[in-house]
Image (cartoon, rainbow, N blue to C red):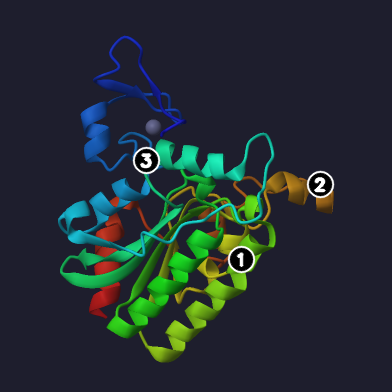
Amino acid sequence: MNDRIKTNLKEDILWLKCSNCKEFIFKRIFEENLKVCPICGFHYRIGAYERIEMTFDDGIRGFKSLFEDIVSKDILGFTTSEPYSLTLEKNREKSGVKEAVIVGTGKVKGYEIAAIIFDFNFMGGSMGFGVGERIIRIFNYASQKKLPVFAFIASGGARMQEGMVSLYQMPRTIIAVEKFKEETRLPYVSIFLNPTTGGVLASFAYLADYIAAEPNALIGFAGPRVIEKTIGRKLPERFQRSEFLLEKGLIDKIVRRNEIRDFVSWWCRS
Ligand SMILES: [Zn+2]
């Protein structure tokens, strides 16, 4: 799950070596610190269920997952090195989730919210039919139940294996957000995680009333190599990282993982 963290081979039960600062950290402290390096503050990638566990009152037990039967299928009969249907099966097994996003409701510090939580471990959090449809349903559900929506984004963008079906999830989710905004006067807040890119960023994610990001998250439509090639210039250091985007006014706030519960409940109070 954490490809960027290496275990110390001698004492792999107790210690981890931070891939960012190279310091050894006590595994228990790392877990207690919500998988953030206690020395350098590097935020390691976590799965959707881990996110739910650390965000909601009573963790996973306090979260009601909705629309679980909605998943992507191989409607195009798409095959590269393997059939897409097999890729889906393998990803379900590897990640422990049935789709690249989990949607549902739960309480944060006593306030009921609707939530969208991406899992990057499932096909890079890519958006195909299953993801788009779940997002649309949760916005409609939030509208009916009068709940604010919080979206935790971690995505590589559109799911190429679904071709046009994947791309049309962009306008569909945009319409769902606009409908939610028209029908309620409740907040829709996005929290960009590492990474937030491509068609997900360029559709419903960026339409939030307020956009926060975890520290050092990669945020952008196309990757830096593509941009450098296109414009023929070297990009500034830290380009497309949360801190750079905040400085340029493209996001509103950086929120550390241990501040997320306070951040969410603040929005529900106001
Ligand atoms: Zn570190």
- Residue 192 locus on image (x, y percent): 46, 58
Q: Is residue 146 visible?
A: no
User: In the displayed structure, would residue 131 be above or below residue 110?
Assistant: above
Residue 233: give its label.
none
The amino acid marked with disc number 3 is Gly
- What SS does tag 3 mark? loop
**Is the CB–ligand 1 distance for label 3 below 8 Å?**
yes
**Is the CB–ligand 1 distance for label 1 below 8 Å?**
no
Q: Which residue is found at the position 22% from the left and 58% from the top? A: 56
Q: Which residue is mark 2?
A: 229
Q: Residues within 10 Å of mark 3 (few under 14, many from 20)?
A: some
How far is disc 1 from disc 3 in space, using C-alphas? 28 Å
Q: Which residue is mark 1?
A: 202
The amino acid marked with disc number 2 is Lys
Disc on the earlier residue, 1 or 2: 1
Q: Is residue 39 left or right of residue 163?
A: left
Q: Residues within 10 Å of mark 2 (few under 14, many from 20)?
A: few
How far is disc 3 from disc 2 in space, using C-alphas? 32 Å
Q: Residues within 10 Å of mark 1 (few under 14, many from 20)?
A: some
Asked if the residue under mark 2 is in contact with the one under mark 3, i.e. CB atoms within 8 Å, the reply is no
